[in-house]
Amino acid sequence: MPLKIIFYPAISLDGYIAKSNGDSDWVTDEDEQIFAEEVARAGCVIVGRRTFEQYKGKIYPMANATTFVCTSHKKVTQDYPADQVVRVSGDVEDIVKQIESRGFTSAILSGGGDTNSWFAIAGLIDEMIVSVYPKMLGAGIGLFGRWDHERGHFPIEVQLNLTLLNTRQLGDGVVQHRYKVIN
Ligand SMILES: NC(=O)c1ccc[n+]([C@@H]2O[C@H](COP(=O)([O-])OP(=O)(O)OC[C@H]3O[C@@H](n4cnc5c(N)ncnc54)[C@H](OP(=O)(O)O)[C@@H]3O)[C@@H](O)[C@H]2O)c1
């Protein structure tokens, strides 16, 4: 069965997943709990190397799930048990095959902006659960983007067409939408 990828970002109202310094400390405990439940249901989560390094020992590795870390560097994951943290690399199509070969049929994608954009451009995102926070940042790390030593983070053009499946209000003014991606 092909891997179903569910993209789960937490964004400011103007579409940033973190401040310029990489902080996304505004994410609520309730949202983190729902995220953990979705990851446990899927059985695995896909993250980029910078996200993994920022949250290792805090969020990752996650209990009851395998964390797939996209990175070209072997040392990033070498200190973890192979059933908890797995390094994946190459084209995103290859990464999907590496995850499928371990028996997974669904995965949660949780960025950051660089990793998100590779999966989105390849048309590999099936659903999206987005938590929209009542705040504007004006600048920061976008939902989709790349990091460049000279320019810092810059946005990448991505087009996803979505159908709304449901919307619910969480605490603290957070609104969570669930969409199906139609391409
Ligand atoms: N609010 C949210 O929902 C949320 C969720 C997650 C993350 N974040 C934030 O996002 C920020 C990090 O985002 P980011 O865009 O800077 O980085 P990122 O996407 O976390 O990591 C980028 C790295 O992932 C690796 N990578 C991506 N695609 C790959 C591929 N196909 N093959 C091999 N390696 C691949 C590369 O690592 P190597 O250089 O090692 O090859 C690349 O440098 C953090 O500030 C974090 O807090 C926010």
Image (cartoon, rainbow, N blue to C red):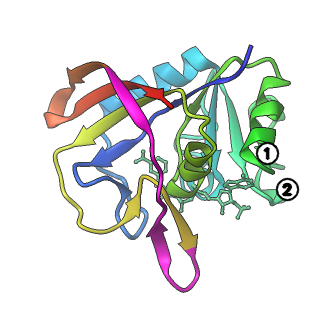
Judge the density around disc 1: few (<14), some (14-19), many (≥20) Cα neighbours within 10 Å.
many
Q: Are marks 1 and 2 in contact (CB under 8 Å)?
A: yes
Please state the extent of the stretch shown in magenta in the rendering.
Answer: 148-164
Mark 2 lies within 8 Å of ligand 1 (Cβ measured):
no
* Residue under the point 83% across and 34% down: 98
Residue 49 in picture, x, y percent from top left: 66, 55
Position of 26 relative to 163 (above/below): below
Horizontally, residue 116 falls left or right of residue 177, namely: right
Report if residue 36 is visible in the image.
yes
Q: Secondary structure at mark 1?
A: strand
* Residue under the point 74% across and 34% down: 96
Residue 119 in picture, x, y percent from top left: 61, 44
* Residue under the point 31% across and 52% down: 15
Position of 14 relative to 19 (above/below): above
* Residue under the point 80% across and 59% down: 72
Q: Nearer the viewer, residue 171 or 132?
A: 132
Residue 128 in picture, x, y percent from top left: 43, 30
Residue 64 covered by magenta stretch: no
Q: Secondary structure at mark 2?
A: helix
**Residue at the extreme bottom:** 150
- Per the rendering, the mark at residue 87 is 1
Judge the density around disc 2: few (<14), some (14-19), many (≥20) Cα neighbours within 10 Å.
few
Residue linked to disc 2: 74
**Amino acid type shown at disc 1:** Arg
Horizontally, residue 160 falls left or right of residue 120, namely: left
Quadrant of the image containing the N terminus: top right
Horizontally, residue 101 falls left or right of residue 46, namely: right
**Amino acid type shown at disc 2:** Lys
Residue 17 in picture, x, y percent from top left: 38, 53
Q: Earlier in the sequence, mark 1 or mark 2?
A: 2
Residue 161 covered by magenta stretch: yes
- Per the rendering, the mark at residue 26 is none
